Image (cartoon, rainbow, N blue to C red):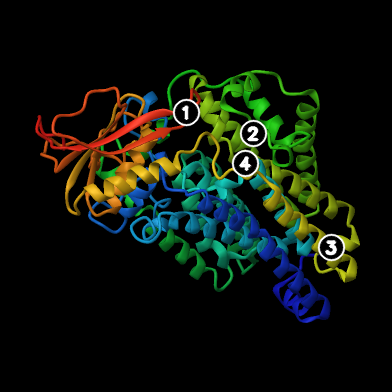
Amino acid sequence: MRERGDGELEAEDASPSGRRDRRRLLLISVCVAVPSIVAAVRVIRADWVPIGDQAIISIRAADVLTGRTPRLGQLSTVSAEVGETTRSPGPMGYWPFAVTARWGPLWGTVVVAAALSASAMVASVRLAARRGGVGLALALALGLALSSRALNPGGLVSTWNPALGLIPLVLLVLLAWSLGMGELRLLPVAVLVASFCAQVHTVLAVAALPVLAIGLVAGLLATARADRPAGLRHRLRLPPGSARPLLGAVVVGVVCWALPVLDEITSDPGNLTLLARGAPGEPSTWSLVGRLLADVLGVPPAFVGGDVLPDEQVESVFFRPAPTTAALTSVAVIGALAVLGLRAARRREREVVVPVLLVLALVGAGAAVARATPGRLFLTLTYTAWWLVLVGMLAWLVLGWAAVRAVDVVALRPGARSGRGGALVTAVGCVAIVAIAVLGPSEAEPDLPIHAEARAVGDAVVRAVDAGGRYYVVGHGRAPSELVAATAYRIRRAGARPVVAGNDGFSPGPRYFPKGKRCTAVVTLSSPSSGMPRGSEVIARIDVPTRDGPSAVRVTVGPDDGPPSC
């Protein structure tokens, strides 16, 4: 099957069927953004404020373009294993929220996260339409809606780094697919998206970098021309116009990675060095790796069924053999992709070879991440392996696409006339996307959110602090560390400086650690039964929901009259 050039695409766009397809694609683009919009509305209506990791992310985002601009990302769970503080590779996950973390409503970061996920979905769908027509775009849109539901729709509007890079990773795959087809003008954008994915969470770097490499190599091979001047058998050179996107990609890469590289140069050892060493200890078992791949690839795949289980059930599931059907069908999916890819390679069908290579590389990256995770940290796979749900969706999508190309279904060819039947299918698909979003899980966030309580404490603390002051924030007893982080963020947002000890994983980093200076005041969150700090004033009392029932927390502000706390 012959590939279509840009001229043919433009001619199709100008035809009546091309105009119909543009209208269908516009409808799909609008509908695929609905899950993000619905999730944002639900989160805002739930009185959301940043707590826990998202509060720490907001503090560090507020530091962007200040004297405390972060060089690296969030604290990594690997830190406790390697014995040194390690973080996600870079700070790009903070950049989108630099404005809303400092000014505007507290839920401003939710709107930005929703805009990021919706934009990535729309861009992915439109790239899919270039690769396989409106039919492939609709299939991808449905897959994205189902995957978002399986992972919990709140992830679409979350600033938490394991969730923030998921939809951009799908966009990166579509960009790499387009690069592989010779669209090198997209290279700077692909480098930007790949850098974002790689920096927000370490495991996504394992997926993003091979995907970008495959797209770039395939694209260079696709656009290179063979000349045969006298005296030479052949010479490969890039066509005119390729230098500009390559130069643009280098510039984008330098901007994205300047701060992590600066940290690597000025620290000993640097963060990238520590990440490259990996976590010590016995790796996870191959049976766990197989179980994970069976869940995301086998029938039913996780993206349609949502194999999302409570934490207390995870251990029994991970160490239980995969159901026979899921295990066999996962092997069949990988085998079918390999066979169709080899068939396409023999026939020089690059439009099939490239996506198959991308998906197989992602599956291999997922297996490598699962295997490299130390056995004692297997519970981290409950969130570090989220992206594999999307990999499963992409695997089934590419498998269907490759099968269609193999049997050459005329009605499903890119550019084939759709008529009323195509319009009806598009309408039904868009209704399904909207229904999945509206009828999906209604919880803004699972696992006992304490947003209302955090807002009450934060409002009381903001009234008690002065801009420009320095406040030590400490939690005792049953005061949740997530609430301590939320309180520190509200102090930072009020124009003061919080000081937080870094012993519970919810610290903004060394620049906010105590340094032996006198504080303006000490903010203490503790149980009412504990003793009152001398000279302190109670500014709030709340009941925090826990699995064991409500837990009372008292918030006090008092003088720093002992050894300097800040």
CA separation in Å, label 4 and label 3: 32 Å
Q: Amino acid at mark 2?
A: Val
Mark linked to residue 91: none
Q: Amino acid at mark 1?
A: Thr
Mark closer to the chain start, 3 or 1: 3
CA separation in Å, label 1 and label 4: 23 Å
Do labels 1 and 2 touch, CB within 8 Å? no
Left or right, 563 with reference to 326? left
Mark closer to the chain start, 1 or 4: 4
- Residue 482: % across, % down: 39, 36
Q: Is residue 234 visible?
A: no
Q: Amino acid at mark 3?
A: Arg
Q: Residues within 10 Å of mark 3 (few under 14, many from 20)?
A: some
Mark linked to residue 308: 2
- Residue 93: % across, % down: 43, 50
For the point 22% across and 50% down, which residue is it? 496
CA separation in Å, label 3 and label 1: 55 Å
Mark closer to the observer (2, 3): 2
CA separation in Å, label 1 and label 2: 21 Å
Mark linked to residue 413: 3
Mark linked to residue 151: 4
For the point 41% across and 63% down, which residue is it? 251
For the point 56% across and 43% down, which residue is it? 207
In this figure, which residue is indicated by the disc labeled 1?
Answer: 546
- Relative to 239, does residue 285 appear above or below in the rendering? above
Figure quadrant of residue 318: top right
Mark closer to the chain start, 4 or 3: 4
Do labels 4 and 2 touch, CB within 8 Å? yes
